[in-house]
Image (tube, rainbow, N blue to C red):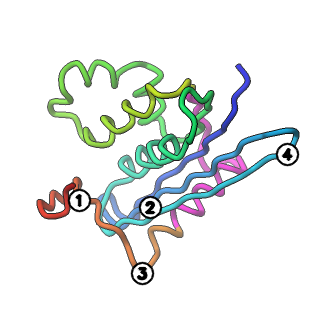
């Protein structure tokens, strides 16, 4: 399958839970030229798995055209295996009862169904240029002075939309 977009993702948390962030690198090749965008955000209190998952969600939500052929590349076995091995669809049927990160899994499934998405796992910290860049972005995001609030994780009533 020829992919229109490659989305590389990583998440980080200093402490688990602790300060965290995600990084996303999106690459599109059009007419022989590679276009690249980067996204990142840091949170004051979260977990590594939430950031790994949020990176994928944000990357997919940035896609502008429905039915895009996309390859998501991540070093997170948690995210990759949950989708590739179809665990998340079983969790969905059970309404995510007793499942961590249900809010993010629900967001993922909504956007996942709007595109043609494949997933690929890569070993982290193994000289994969885009994965290394995502890691840099995630760590940088978690170290910022102004951090966002992961309202679902912190269970802050007034912050929920």
| Mark 2 to mark 3 CA distance (whole Å) | 12 Å
Vertical side of 48 occupied by 139: above or below: below
Quadrant containing the N terminus is: top right
Query: Tag 1, which secondary structure?
Result: helix
Viewer-nearest of labels 2 and 1?
1
| Mark 4 to mark 3 CA distance (whole Å) | 36 Å
Residue 21: give its label.
2
Horizontal relation, residue 85 to residue 62: left or right? left
Residue 41: give its label.
none
Residue 151: give its label.
1
| Mark 3 to mark 1 CA distance (whole Å) | 18 Å
Q: Are marks 4 and 2 in contact (CB under 8 Å)?
A: no
- Measuring from the top left, give residue 111's x and y in whole percent: 43, 34
Residue name at image x 62 percent, y 32 percent: 71
Q: Which residues are magenta?
A: 119-139
Residue furthest out toward the left: 157
Query: Tag 3, which secondary structure?
Result: loop
93 or 129: which is nearer to us?
93
Magenta segment includes 127: yes
Residue 145: give its label.
3
Vertical side of 126 occupied by 150: above or below: below
- Measuring from the top left, give residue 40's x and y in whole percent: 51, 61
């Amino acid at each position: 399958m020829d992919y229109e977009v490659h989305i590389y993702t990583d998440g980080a948390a200093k402490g688990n839970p602790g300060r965290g962030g995600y990084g996303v690198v999106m690459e599109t090749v059009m007419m022989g030229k590679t276009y690249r965008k980067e996204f990142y955000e840091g949170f004051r209190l979260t977990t590594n798995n939430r950031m790994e998952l949020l990176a994928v969600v944000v990357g997919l939500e940035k896609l502008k055209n429905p039915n895009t052929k996309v390859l998501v590349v991540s070093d997170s076995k948690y995210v990759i295996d949950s989708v590739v091995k179809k665990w998340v669809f079983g969790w969905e049927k059970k309404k995510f009862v007793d499942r961590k990160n249900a809010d993010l899994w629900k967001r993922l499934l909504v956007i996942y169904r709007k595109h043609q998405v494949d997933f690929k796992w890569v070993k982290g910290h193994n000289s994969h240029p885009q994965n290394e860049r995502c890691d840099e972005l995630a760590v940088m995001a978690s170290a910022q002075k102004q951090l966002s609030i992961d309202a679902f994780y912190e269970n802050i009533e007034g912050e929920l939309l």
